[in-house]
Image (cartoon, helix red, strand yellow):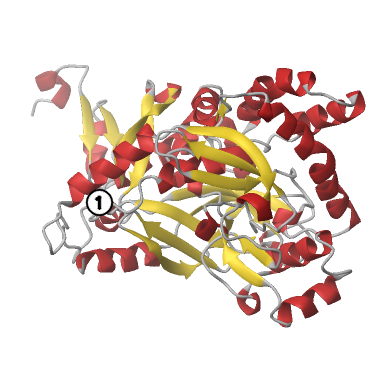
Amino acid sequence: MAKINDVFGKDLTVINIGLAGMAKSVSDQGVKVVDLDWQPPKDGIPRLRATKSGVGMDAANQEVVSRIKRGQAVLVGMGIARDVIPGMHDRMILHAGPPIEWNRMCGPTRGAVMGALIYEGLAQDEKEAIALVESGAIEFSPCHHHHAVGPMAGVVSPSMPVFILENKTFGSRAYCTQNEGLGKVLRYGGMGAEVYARLKWMETDLYPALDRALQTLPNGIDIKSLIAQAMHMGDECHNRNRAATSLFLRAIGPALARTNKDNEVLAKVIEFIDRNDHFFLNLSMPAGKAMLEAAEGVEGSTIVTVMARNGTDFGIRLASMPERWFTAPAGKVQGLYFPQFTEKDANPDIGDSTITETAGYGGMAMAAAPAITQFVGGTPQMATQNTLEMYEITFGEHENFTIPALNFRGTPLGIDVRKVMETGILPQINTGIAHKDPGVGMVGAGILRAPEKCFRDAFEALQKM
């Protein structure tokens, strides 16, 4: 019997879409075999193409993706949360993820709430903070209900300075606090004198310096452009923001110098940003939020516009149902831990930072940031494979965010609930890990998949539209 190479030539490559063992006889003949990780559509999953009223889902999704890509997120200014965030008041605390009350909050969210109340001067210590919360005097609300986003615990209290991002194409605005850095910080549930002192310095020195500088920039700072540039420099703008932070510092540096009132304060502001590679995260997140909100309210769309976690629940919302949460228990992160900690110390998945994946970067763009695997675990090959897999569950590609290693292909954009259910592939997330107990802070970083139940419930709701 003739060998395969004798018939088809020596340069033949065979793609195997079955079990790896099925191609063994081919590879034994010296033929190059590429194994494709593929599985048939899941049984019992109907193919949705239109709503019951006849609205075409593909056309709706095309509109959603078009709006996201046309969005232009610009940092236009700063302000104090109570003064600029819609619906914020002096007795309100915003948090990450879907709605949740005190009795169901996880350790790091509780720690961040208590710390925020002490920072605000509403409580003298943790005991007073708990008593104040349990009295019913504090209102809790998700950041996402106020056009805001918050990393990890996501807590925003009334006195905190926030960035203001505007989508110049559609006019929507989004808000986020300043990034404290890693380790024992409020957003990871950290409490203590050093945490409050840092927050006060960010309020009294960092914020005024940045605010003065931004007031002299009539066109603001184009954050979308910085994200695109950073992805060509090894960032994915969720858990790796080293290049983006440097680009931001370069963009605002001259204005900081021109509006400087104290050289030592200026030096400390520059040092703080320079030493905090995650500083840009609190700009990339509201940029994603501002661009995604403009795509909400499109009837018939099956695309996810919110993915968020509060450390207890994981929730998603759709462009066609922007007011409705579909939730499931938050997942367990697989990752790398600081030396003194293990997975037994870890809280479940937490934070609004998955807005980056929803907007087409973050975990969707890991192929652009192979070095991120040193922070979250895995290998550079895994980072590339994660991105390639995400194309299977997204409706389009973001031509403004391109990946050099993939021949400048646009990032996967528009998580489509239908494709998630048809393929069984769940969105990939990379994230930080908070200690499960209040007051400790960050213990590591890692990766995980979004829970399937959110997408199954959303899919069932789509069938009834």
Q: Nearer the viewer, residue 237 or 140?
A: 140
How far from the left and from the top, in percent, is residue 401?
43, 29
- Residue ID at (84%, 69%): 123
In this rendering, is residue 311 above or below 339? below
How far from the left and from the top, in percent, is residue 330?
52, 65
Residue 321 sits in quarter: bottom left
In this rendering, is residue 456 above or below 67? below
Q: Nearer the viewer, residue 227 or 344?
A: 227
Q: Is residue 212 left or right of residue 223?
A: right
Viewer can see residue 413: yes
- Residue ID at (59%, 41%): 164
How far from the left and from the top, in percent, is residue 285?
55, 43
- Residue ID at (28%, 58%): 421
Position of the N terminus, as image quadrant, is: top left
Viewer can see residue 378: no
Q: Is residue 19 left or right of residue 112?
A: left
Give the secondary structure at mark 1.
loop
Residue 457 sits in quarter: bottom left
| Amino acid residing under circle 1 | Gln
Position of the C terminus, as image quadrant, is: bottom left
Residue 255 sits in quarter: top right
Q: Is residue 397 left or right of residue 119?
A: left
How far from the left and from the top, in percent, is residue 72?
45, 32
- Residue ID at (30%, 44%): 64
**Tag 1 residue:** 39
Q: Nearer the viewer, residue 78 or 197?
A: 78
